[in-house]
Image (cartoon, rainbow, N blue to C red):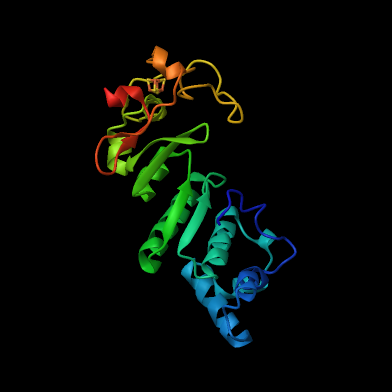
Amino acid sequence: MIFQDPYASLNPKMRIAEILQEGMDALSIAKNSDERQRRIDELLEQVGLEKASKWRYPHEFSGGQRQRIAIARVLAVNPNLLICDEPTSALDVSVQAQILNLLKSLQQQLGLSYLFISHNLAVVEYLAHEVYVMYLGRIVERGTVKEVLHAPKHPYTQALLSAVPRIDGQGMKTIRLPGETPSPSNPPQGCHFHTRCAQAMAKCREVYPGETIITATHRVHCYLAAE
Ligand code: SF4
C-alpha cells in the first residue's frame, strides 16, 4: 500500500535501506545480505533515487522523494496489486506529475495493477483504465474511463464532473448539490443520494436502485438510467 502522506508513512528512526529491507525480511524475499543490498540498489534506481540514498533518513528527503521511497518499499515485496490511497494529494503539483509518471511507467514495465483512490478526476483520467464512483460507501457507477468520465449516467458522477474547473470555460454547467453529505454509518433509506439529487422521484426514497447495465462494462445504480 502507498499512503497519502509520505511525511507520516516512513519511520523517521529507520534508514532507507532498513525501510526497504523490512518487507523483504518479513516475506523471506532475499536469500542473503548481498542479494538484499543488490535488490535495494535496484529498487532505488527504479524509482529514480541514488543508491547512496539508502544510508540516509526520511527527514533528509523532500515530499516527492519520500513518496518515491514509499513506492520502492512496496515494490520490494514483488506485488501484483498496489493500493494507492491518494498518493499524490499531499505533494506540490509539479511533483505530483513526476510521481504519476513514475507510477505509469512502473505499471507498464512491471505489469502491475493499481487500485487507485482519488478525488482528482484529472489524475483518474490520466492513470486509470476502469473507474468506480462511490457515494456513502457504495459504488454508484462504474465503467471505462471514456464511459464514466465522458458519458456519465449517474447524477452524482455528473455533479462531480461539473465541478471540475476548465481553463477555457467550456466545461459542463455546474450542478450544485444542496445540503450536507449524510453520515455513511446511517445512510438515508432508498437511494443514498436522494437527499441531494434534483431528479429524485418517490421510488428513490424507498428502495435502493438495482444495477442497470448500459454496456458490457458500464453499470449504474440509478432509476433514471433504467428508464
Ligand atoms: S436513483 Fe433517484 S435519487 Fe438516486 S441518483 Fe437516481 S434519480 Fe437521483
Taking 182 as reference, is 129 above or below it? below
- Name the residue furthest right: 13
Residue appearing at x 32%, y 41% in the figure: 143
Q: Position of residue 14 (x, y in %)?
A: 72, 67
Quarter of the image for residue 113 reads bottom left
In which quadrant of the rendered image does the C terminus lie?
Answer: top left
Is residue 218 rendered to the left or right of residue 193? left
Residue appearing at x 64%, y 75% in the figure: 25
Is residue 29 rendered to the left or right of residue 155? right
Taking 79 as reference, is 117 above or below it? above
Residue appearing at x 59%, y 58% in the figure: 66
Q: Nearer the viewer, residue 214 or 71?
A: 214
In which quadrant of the rendered image does the N terminus lie?
Answer: bottom right
Q: Position of residue 55 (x, y in %)?
A: 66, 73
Q: Position of residue 123 (x, y in %)?
A: 41, 44
Residue appearing at x 60%, y 87% in the figure: 34
Q: Nearer the viewer, residue 178 or 203?
A: 203
Is residue 155 rendered to the left or right of residue 137? left
The answer to whether any part of residue 176 appears in the image is: no
Q: Position of residue 85 (x, y in %)?
A: 53, 48
Quarter of the image for residue 207 reads top left
Q: Nearer the viewer, residue 160 or 138?
A: 138
- Name the residue furthest front: 207
